[in-house]
Amino acid sequence: MAWNEPGGNNQDPWGGKRGNDGPPDLDEALKKFQDKLNGIFGGSGGGSSSQGGGLSGGAIGFILVAVLVVYGLFGIYQVNEQEQAVVLRLGVYSDTKNAGLHWNPPLIDQVTQVNVTKVRSHSAKGEMLTEDLNIVEVNLSVQYRIADTKNFVLNVRNPERSLAQATDSALRHVIGSTEMHEVLTEGREQIAIDVEARLQQYLESYGTGIVVDKVNVQETNPPREVQAAFDDVNKAREDEERLKNEAETYSNGIIPEARGAAQRVIEEATAYREQVVAKAEGEAQRFEQLLSEYKKSPRVTRERLYLDAVQDVMASSSKVMIDVEGGNNMLYLPLDKIVTNSGVGARATDVSPQVIREITDRVSDQLRREAINNTRRREVR
């Protein structure tokens, strides 16, 4: 049965009685609800509340607890593995937190988290004067990371801007101590090393907490007005290097070849020496053996030596001189002409010693017979 239906005793949901002629009393309903809250949180009931509907001590305590809980929750924060946190308590350095879950009172402590493992990069570019008073354009990049979080946050107002200014200063100092030729060609690596050392020195003196990992000189160019002339110079240097490389290649090829030829000549000379020595030793041994045979039978050995000598001489000669016993004249035989006229068609040096000996014997016999016949004719006369 609804509270406003007939027989409902005119009871309203706020616990009061309602007349048939008006709406429920809102002030009374709010008062009753407040009394219930006071009873829950330990407050006095009924008329203990002040006039005007003020909050009791229990409600104030509840609000304070809620505020404290919210305050505590706002003070919880997490530091990642790549980060460190610098804590300032009332503006004064307090601590440096590492990775993990931490709590610091809000509004009292100020927490600044910084990534200390990330490698950051800064680029610098500009025109500057070299040692030989020439202008060059240099473009380089600096890779760095944060090594000291406290110094990075507290010592310098803007560490990255200080890094940029220190980079420009170090670069101009190094370029101003280097000639233009080295800046544009093979000296860039050394320039990067010098800039890195000087830049790190500047950053340490400033106390920025930054450490430089690498400095790369990406590009160096002369002024645009003289770019064509420098291109010609670079081309000439490239031609010079190419010619040097070709000369070294030729040298590397000809020197081993000459050494090989020299070694071959040395080996041939060594072989010839061994051959001559061995031949001489063999001749000496043959002579010793011949000497022993000569002592045994001198006449036979002498004739044999004579025949061998004549044979060696006749084998290499195309002319023969014959002295016949009983004759007064010495006969000259041109064997090369005889062989040519006989139609053999071979050279005299190609005739064997046996053929020469046979021809010689025949001619000797013929001459001996003629000499005998001539002698008989003289006797008959």
Image (cartoon, rainbow, N blue to C red):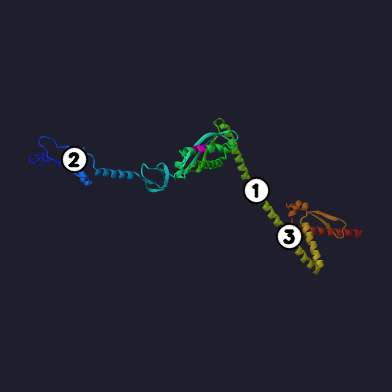
Residue visible at 77% across and 64% down?
Answer: 287
Check the image and name the residue furthest to the left: 7
Tag nearer the camera, 3 or 2? 2
Check disc 1 and report its element: helix, strand or loop. Answer: helix
Estimate the spatial distance between the alpha carbons at disc 3 and disc 2, rounded to whole Å.
143 Å
Check disc 2 and report its element: helix, strand or loop. Answer: helix
Q: Quadrant of residue 315?
A: bottom right
> Range of the magenta residues?
164-168
Q: Position of residue 88 (x, y in %)?
A: 41, 43
Q: Residues within 10 Å of mark 1 (few under 14, many from 20)?
A: few
**Do the numbered discs 3 and 2 sit on residues whose CB atoms are within 8 Å?**
no
Q: Name the residue tied to disc 3.
A: 277
Would residue 269 be seen by someone viewing this image from the given angle?
yes
Above or below, comparing residue 26 to residue 333 in the picture? above
Out of 316 and 221, give the one closest to the viewer. 221
Mark identifier at residue 255: 1
**Do the numbered discs 1 and 2 sit on residues whose CB atoms are within 8 Å?**
no
Would residue 82 be seen by someone viewing this image from the given angle?
no
Q: For residue 368: magenta?
A: no
Examine the residues drawn in magenta and state their main secondary structure.
helix
Residue visible at 17% across and 40% down?
Answer: 29
- Which quadrant holds the C terminus? bottom right
Q: Name the residue tied to disc 2.
A: 31
Check disc 3 and report its element: helix, strand or loop. Answer: helix
**Comes first in the chain, label 1 or label 2:** 2
Residue visible at 81% across and 67% down?
Answer: 298
Q: Amino acid at mark 2?
A: Lys
